[in-house]
Amino acid sequence: MNSQITKLFAVIVLLFGVLIYFTSRWTVFSATALNANALNARPQIEQLRIKRGSIFANDGTVLAKSVKAGHGTWSRTYPEGSLFSQAVGYSEPSAGDAAGLELSAANYLRGSPSSISALFGLSTSTQVGDDVHTTLDPGAQKTARQALDGQAGSVVALNPRTGAVLAMYSNPTYDDNHPSPNKQCDAVGCLVNRAVSSAYPPGSTFKIVTATAAINTGKYTPNSIVNGNSPVTVSGVPLSNDGNQSFGDITLTDALTYSVNTVWAPVAVNVGTKTMTEYMKRFGFYAKPPLDYPAGEMLPSRVQSPGGQYYPPGSADEDIGRIGIGQGGLVVTPLQMAMVASAVADDGKLMVPHLVSSVIAPDGRTVTTIQPRLYHQVMTVKTAQEINLMMRTVVDEGTGTPAQLGNGIEFAGKTGTASVGPTGLGETQPWFIGFAPANDPKVAVAVDLERSDSGQSGGQVAAPIARDVVQTLLSEGK
Amino acid sequence: MSARNRELMGLLPASLLITAGFAGVFIQRKSELTNVSLTYGAIFLGLCLAAHVFIRITLPYADPYLFPLVSVLASFGLVMIYRISSDDARQQAQWFVIGLLLFAATVIAFRDYRKLEQYRYVIVSISLVLLILPRVPGLGEQVNGAYLGIRIPGTSGFQPTEFSKVGLVIFLASYLRDTRQVMVQGARRVLGVTIPPLKHFGPVLVIWGVAMVILFLLSDIGSSLMFYGALLAMLYVATGRFSFVVVGLIAFGLGAWFLGTHIPHVHARFEDWQHPFEPKIYNAVLGSYQLANGLFAQAAGGVFGQGFGQSILTTASGSALIPEPQTDMIYAVITSELGLFGAVGVLLTYLLFVYRGFKIAILARDSFSKLLATGLSAVFALQVFVIVGGVTKAIPLTGVTLPFISYGGASIVANFVLVALLLLVSDRARRPVVRT
């Protein structure tokens, strides 16, 4: 019987070989597919078990924190709710969904298990993420919300010296504690961060870009005499000023002060598509903003054809004259326009905008501190100072007077009132961009309101909002 | 070194394992490393030492590796269960003590285990009754659609099949010792197939029928495979006729195929096995949820595992992510936390145990002892194959315990009886022949 017993043992060894084969099949060969299987709840539970780091405003206000949700899991609460929701976003691991900073800073917020503890499995079971400190200013956010007063639109404020985003608020908004939008909220796109995810015609605020190209190339100076009669023919189609007003021979500065379309469109044509495109690129057009924010939630600023396609940069089909006054299919994000103001404010240096200021580990160690970085030197210091002076006259005596700050602080700005919607209805997109104090800029700002049915101008409605936000930030010493 | 001293040394790794294991759980739970873990280790070691002394006195020549292997498996199981549920671990520790007591009782009562042969029909009757017991109304307990346990107050699901397997092996060893000669000699060849005489083969057919009835009545594919596999293994060793095994396997295959296609519950189990990731089957009542989540847990383990105490066992709402993690699915938890390496380590420990079992069979001097040791080792190996094979989707999943590791009172006690019988056979086999 002994030989049978030996053979039987061989069969048993074979059976155990089958067990080892199948175990390795699941642990090694098919592991990746199983881990990614839609029925597999483990990855989600793993995310829920991580104590994500908190997100803070620049004064230490908690914008997002993890609270115990029982059974070893954590859930996210946003104490400031809708005030910061567009910038902060949300994290919903159970739905596999995240947005805003919660998504772009996820690697910091999640942290990582240390390799040694993972190897021995003797660590505490909770993975704790790093805290993310942002540059967002609660006072400016509150002022922006208050000043917008429920109107659809957005406010972006930057520190022109560092690129720090001081305010990023847009309406309509949502409560990120409950990111699954209701129908009513969904219908108006409440989850869309209009500051970076929506692009609109910038109207006359774009004349700053045209002016930069005109002066920095040496083709014009602020004192160049230009003709402001209305109408003029651009690309074979007549173009007129607001109210078809004619200004006669004026300086380029005056043309900006009174936002004379019939000057700036020919100036853009004169500068040429190639040079205009070059300067747009220097300001950051034609690329997604270099912001530390999810790329999928940001749009580049560019030119749309009447058919809804996007022209490649510098296309011969563009109507560069109308683009030069912020029309002609040009669509831009509010952040892009804040970057335009910021570049002028900081002597022509465009800094990389950023929301995160520093990342702090749970043990108090500083993981990283974001240093100001130059994005582009857009123009010479001289050009920047000349445009700075031109923009001051806009607020001092031109279309932007409602933005005046008083107390001897000068605001350099530019209004915009883009025509939007069907021709003849007179719907507008009011804008204001600028920076203050003009002689020592600390805040650059862009404000836009989405589609004013009554055709209000940027000077009337956007400039006061910009004034309030800038006033708040300056009074806080930011 | 004498056999008993080797056994004593063999207990060292077991005690180190349990102490380190409990220490691991304590650290993982963020409590400080207290001397409680050392106390647990010490108590376990004390129990093992007591058993060792008992073996030293009663079975001085028995195989020295079997008991240390059992201690390694049991201590590993205890730590694993403690990590899943400390309440279950406390119960399991009590069952461990009861198992040791029954172990001692078996050794004392059946010092001459050959007298078991006298009671073979009593033993097989009791075994069959125990098998049917879970189906008795009021007593039975339906788990996942299969009737595997009976309710005994104070315990959670007592599985009588664990004892049946030992009883049936004793019966077969005794019966085949008597009839193995006539089965071979009386065989006729029909169409090139050797057919044993029906008169002697009858009881074997009865066991085949019983395996099918288990499948039919208890809806328990795993147990029937285990019993039937042990029967074929013993038949082969007793007669040396491989053709019997082939005929037996075909008969089992036909039976299983018929039941699999005609009994809805058995059919459903086959479907679960074949398509565990089909959303419809996954979400169905008694569907493949358990199997699929076991496989997900193993995938999460990878080669080295997630680390002890790191696998996710509960959902966000606190329910069990893998149903029955401490019994049926404990192999998935082991693989998840200790990876392929840990799982293979456990399998090799079992294989060593089976190897020592067969070694005892080879050394045994009489047919009954040989068949008994073979049967016990085979049924033990097949039990491991059935549950690990089920959890790894090699075969349909059925609730059988992983011997000495899974939580379960009947399992640990019955397996201690199994070990006691193996050691009894071993002691007699290795005893120096004294000429008088």
Image (tube, coloured by chain):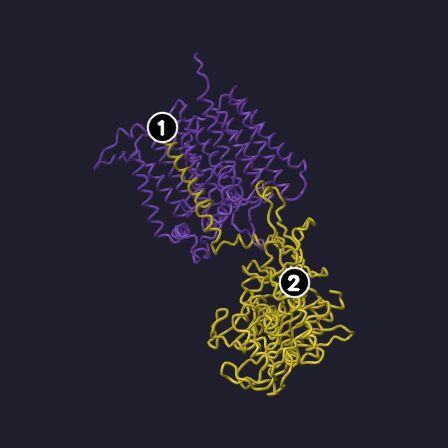
Q: Which residue is mark 1?
A: B177
- Residue A69 appears at what percent x and percent y? 63, 56
- Residue A99 appears at what percent x and percent y? 58, 62
Q: Given the image, on which type of amino acid does mark 2 rest?
A: Gly
- Residue A96 appears at what percent x and percent y? 54, 59
Q: In the drawing, what numbered circle is on residue A163?
A: 2
Which tag is nearer the camera, tag 1 or tag 2? 2
| Colour for chain B in the figure | purple
Disc 1, SS? helix
Report the residue that reaches farthest toward the right: A407
Q: In the drawing, what numbered circle is on residue B365?
A: none
Q: Which chain is yellow?
A: A
Against B78, residue B268 (above or below) is below
Give the Cα distance between marks 1 and 2: 91 Å
Disc 2, SS? loop
**Front-lying residue, B403 or A128:** A128
Report the residue that reaches farthest toward the left: B191
Against B12, residue A26 (above or below) is below
Q: Given the image, on which type of amino acid does mark 1 rest?
A: Arg
Quadrant of the rendering where the C terminus of chain B is positioned:
top left
- Residue B162 appears at what percent x and percent y? 47, 39
**Front-lying residue, A5 or B303:** B303
> Total marks drawn?
2
Left of B429 or right of it: where is A417?
right
Picture residue at 59% right of the left edge, 32% below the top: B16
Mark 1 and mark 2 in contact? Answer it, CB < 8 Å. no
**Front-lying residue, A420 or B47:** A420
**Front-lying residue, B133 or A461:** A461
Against A274, residue B67 (above or below) is above
> How many C-alpha atoms fall within 10 Å of the one at disc 2: few (<14), some, or many (≥20)?
many
Residue A171 sits in which quadrant? bottom right
